[in-house]
Amino acid sequence: ADSLSDAAIAKAAEAAALDAKAEGQSRFQQKKDADAGEVQELGYYQGRDGRTRFFQAYQTVGTTEHTWVEPTEHTPNTVMQEYLKGVITRNRVPMPAVLRQTRLKALDLSGMGLGDDYISALGDVLTMMQYLESINVRNNRLTDSGINSILSPAIRLKNLERINLSENEVGERSSRRLLKFLTDRNCKLTALILEKADVDDEECRHIMEAFETNQSVTELNLGNNLIGQAESMNVVQPDLVTGGEATATMLRVNTTLKILNLSWNSLRAESATDIAQAIGDNSTLTQLELSHNAFGDMPSQYLGMALAHNQSMQRLDLSYNAVSPAAAMVIASAFKTNNSLSYLNLDGNKIGKRGASALMGALRSGQEGLRDVAISVEDCDSTFDDGTLFNPVEPSMAATLDLTSPYDNMVARELLRLANKRNGCGFTVLKHTPLRAKGAKGKPKSRTIVLKRDDTSEAPEHPPVRWDSLLGDVNKLRVMQPHLLRSITDSMGLAPMPKTITAIVQKINKKIEARPDIWIDEHMLLDLSFRSIFNEVDKDGSGEIDKDEMYQCLTLLGITPTVAAVKRAIAEYDTDGSGFMEEDEFVTYMLVSANQEICEFWSLAHETKPLSAALF
């Protein structure tokens, strides 16, 4: 190298630079050609023909046999690797359906449509996910094999609390696997969701059999299934146990379940009646969804009778179940003894005027007991009046009541209550005939019962108001007369002075004259009467009265209350905490205190507003 001349060295360096430049140009051209090929390849799968070519290529991949290379001892298996191994050995295209986290708590594969093979591969690795608390494989086209591949290893997951198998196809084998899973002593599941899972009566029977002994699940969702479709087979197969009957048996013995969803099924007839009666024996269920079934008249009546004894139910959805007016009345009467029910949904049922009035009375009863009660009656026909039903405003009747019938039982209890509380009401004749004993001959003997009110000697008797004739006169003449108002106040145990009667009549007639097209009913007359008294005392027009003015109002009605009673009334009905009683609060107080039964059957059409405030 030392012997080379400077000229030779310079020439060698120039040659090396030329070689480097040529190599760089060659690499640039190769990259350019590769990019052009990639663009051309992408274009190959574009457009209508491109989509067809892509699908054909995908089919080829799916049918190609894949191999799995076992990891070495230095690279231990992971959940992802084991899952991919299961997919490949089932000759399926690998899909990243499982996350890489080893401490995964919620596995959500809902709506992916994976199918049995992919979910079976997932089942192979479930035991490696010991931190799992929730599995959701909703809407994955699963059948018995896929569902069982989840349930079999799931029992070994100590932290698993929730499984969602909705919108898959639960069959005979998977329902039996559910039975085994739920009765396992290691089962810690708290929620099982099987909505729209093709569960029929037979499969429901297996599930309910498991819940007879299960002590962990608190929520069961079987909405939108096929339960109840075998009801008609009971005629030819009396020993057949339907899904509804199995559910009723479970409710009578289960002490853990709190939320049960049976909406959008076909529960009806005897199965529906069995479920309704079982509610009376259950002490743990707090929420029951029965919407969009076919309970109809009698099962709904039995449900109302059961609610009268149940003290755990908080929310009941009976919407769109063909609930009759009579059934609505029985359900409403349950609020008198049921202290837990706070929400009732009767949307889409033809409950009629009598049913609507009874439900409004239930709302009023809840307010008296300082309970928050909500009743939904959207899309209900509450305008028609079934004249054959019991009318608590005009209770005079001669009837034979079967106390085993929910409706007749409700009527009997209402008659007893009215006879005990309403002045002028009582039984002319009351007889009880026991049921004929099985195998007994002859007709059972009737026994006459004599009832006596404890306060008969203290409370003066007053004839009840004949509302039909009274309202007929008022609406025909379009004028209220003093003697008619006097008959109303007498029946309520009130004794206003003649000048008070005159003042009330004048104000009522002004309201009637202002609205000649309005039909006057008993609710409007009572509401307007008490508002007239309030306005007579509220001279400054402030819309509220203090304890002294409250005392004056009661005095005008012929009541002589104690100061303590006045203070207690204001404290109880002062809903806004102002220390005063407002006009609406005064009207509510008078309806409750002076005439309890009128308040209980306040028309539903008035909603929560007093009628006169809404119309005038």
Image (cartoon, rainbow, N blue to C red):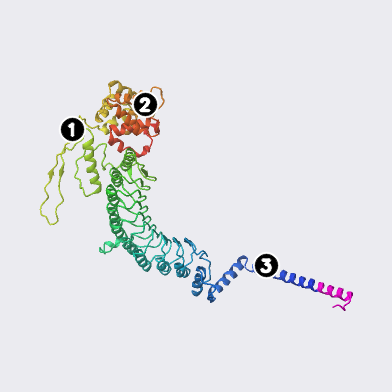
Residue where numbered disc 3 is placed: 39
**Is residue 73 found left or right of 293 in the rendered image?**
right
**Is residue 566 found left or right of 56 in the rendered image?**
left
Answer yes or no: do the residues labelled 2 and 1 have beta carbons within 8 Å? no
Where is residue 337 shown, x and y percent of the image? 28, 44
Q: Is residue 518 visible?
A: no
Where is residue 205 shown, x and y percent of the image? 32, 63
**Regarding mark 2 in the picture, which secondary structure is present there?**
loop
Crowd rating for badge 3 (residues with CA inside 10 Å; few <14, some 14–19, many 20+): few
Viewer-side label of 2, 1:
2
Tell which of 448 and 505 is nearer to you: 448
Viewer-side label of 2, 3:
2
Where is residue 361 shown, x and y percent of the image? 31, 39
Residue segment shown in magenta = 1-18
What residue sits 43% from the left and 63% below the top? Answer: 168
Tell which of 613 and 286 is nearer to you: 286
Residue where numbered disc 2 is placed: 546
